[in-house]
Image (cartoon, rainbow, N blue to C red):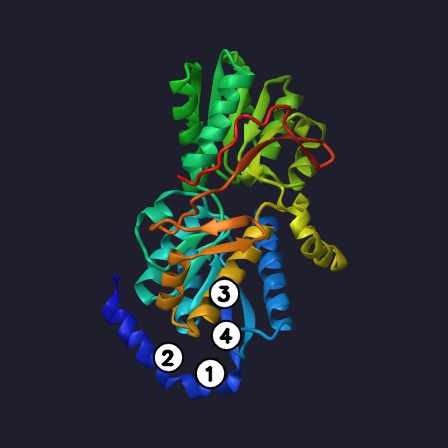
Amino acid sequence: MKNMMHKSLLALAIGAGMTSLSAQAEITIGLAGPVTGPVAQYGDMQFIGAEMAIEQINAQGGVNGEMLKGVKYDDACEPKQAVAVANQIVNDGVQFVVGHLCSSATQPASDIYAEEGILMITPASTSPTITEAGYETVFRTIGRDDAQGPVAGRFIAEHIKPERMAIIHDKQQYGEGVATAVRDTVEEAGVNVVVFEGITAGQQNYSSLVSKLKRENVDFVYYGGYHPELGLILRQSKELGFDAQFMGPEGVGNPDISKIAGEASEGLLVTLPQAFETDPKNAELVAAFEAKNQDPSGPFVMPAYTAVQLMAEGMKATESTDPYEVAEYLHQNTFDTPIGEVKYDESGDLEEFNFVVYNWHADGTKSKADTGEAQSDAAQ
C-alpha cells in the first residue's frame, strides 16, 4: 500500500485523539461542492443525497456507536476555491469527504486529500484523470467521461447520422473532456465534424457562435459543459433562426435549462445516469425524499447517498475511522446500493455504470430516447 508512513502517523494521531472523539461521539463527513455560483443546483442534488444517507444511518444507530455529521463546504465549482476548501477540510480534521462536484474543482482538491490521507468519494466528477492519478483514497460513484462520451457518440453516429456536426465545449476539464470523447467516437464512425471549439463559461452573448454554425450549415450540435451556457445558446439559436438539434452530457440535465431556454429546450438530447428513482428497490428511499419535498431524480442525488453509505459500511466493517483501512475495504468488497451493485477497480472507478440517452422537454422533464441501444455499462 502507498503512503504507509503517513498511514502510521495518522493511526497514531487517531489514537491520541480517541478520548476527544469518543466524547463528541461524531464522525464528520465534509460535503464539498457548489453552495453558490451558476451550478449550485447540482450542489443541492449532492447535498440532499448525502444528508439523507447521514440521517437514515444515524436513525439506525450511527456507525460503531457514533453519529455521522455532515458539514457543507462551498467551492462554487471553482478550482482555486476548491483548493481553499480542501485545505480548510484538512485544518478542520475532517477525514471523509463527499465531493467535489465539478471535475475542475475535484482534481486539485483530490491531490490535497490524497497527500493528507483523506478519503474522498465524488458523486459527480467524471473526468478520467481524477482517478488515473492512482490515489488509494479517491473514489467516485459515477461513470467517467470516456464512458459517457462514447455513449453519446455512438447514439449520434447510429441514430442521428448528421451530415455536418459541430462540437462546442466550455474549455473546462469536464466540458472539454467529454466533448473530446464524443469527437473521437463520432469521427471514428465517419461523422463529419466541421466545428470543434470552446466558448467562455459565463458569457451571455453567443450570436457570433450561432452565426458561425449557420454559415457552416451545421445540422447537429454537441455541447460539453453545464446548463447555464447551453440554455443561452439554445435560446439565442432559436431567436436567430438556427434550428439544428443539440445534445449534451449530464451537466446540462437540469430543469433550469428549460427556464433559460424555454421552448428551445424541447428536443434536446441528454446523457444521464439511469433513473435510479424508478428502480422499485429504491421506492422507500424515494418516498423519504418526497416526504421532505425533495426531488430524488437529480443525477447526483443517489450517487451522493451511495457515497455516504459506502463510507459508513467501510467504517462499520473495519471498526475503524482510518481512511486507509476504509479505502482498502472499499477496494476489496462489493456493495448493494441505490445505484446498483458497486464494485471498484484498483483506480477507484466503478466497474459498471450506465449512461442512458434521454429526450429533454421544455417543461423540464425527460423521457428515454426511442432506442436504448447506445448505452454504456462500464466505467472504463
Q: Are marks 3 and 1 in contact (CB under 8 Å)?
A: no
* Cα gap from disc 4 to disc 1, whole angstroms: 8 Å
Q: Are marks 2 and 1 in contact (CB under 8 Å)?
A: yes
Q: Is residue 137 above or below residue 103?
A: below
Return the disc, 4 or 1, that comes first in the chain's sequence: 1
Give the percent coordinates (x, y) of residue 200: 47, 36
Q: Which residue is mark 4?
A: 27
What secondary structure is found at the residue carrying circle 1?
Answer: helix
User: 6 or 237: nearer the eye?
Assistant: 6
Q: Residue at x 56, y 34 (%)?
A: 356
* Dot 1 amino acid type: Leu
Query: In this rendering, does residue 204 appear at all?
Result: no
* Cα gap from disc 2 to disc 3, whole angstroms: 19 Å
* Cα gap from disc 2 to disc 1, whole angstroms: 9 Å
Mark number for residue 14? 2
Q: Judge depth for marks 3 and 1 and give the one in front.
A: 3
Mark number for residue 21? 1
Q: Is residue 315 above or below residue 126?
A: below
In the rendered view, does 187 fall on the left or right side of 374? left
Return the disc, 4 or 3, that comes first in the chain's sequence: 4
Q: Which residue is mark 3?
A: 313
Return the disc, 2 or 4, that comes first in the chain's sequence: 2
Q: Judge depth for marks 2 and 3 and give the one in front.
A: 3
Q: Quadrant of the N terminus?
A: bottom left
Query: In this rendering, does residue 156 appear at all?
Result: yes
* Dot 2 amino acid type: Ile
* Cα gap from disc 4 to disc 3, whole angstroms: 13 Å
* Dot 4 amino acid type: Ile
Give the percent coordinates (x, y) of residue 182: 44, 28
Give the percent coordinates (x, y) of residue 342: 48, 51
Mark number for residue 87? none
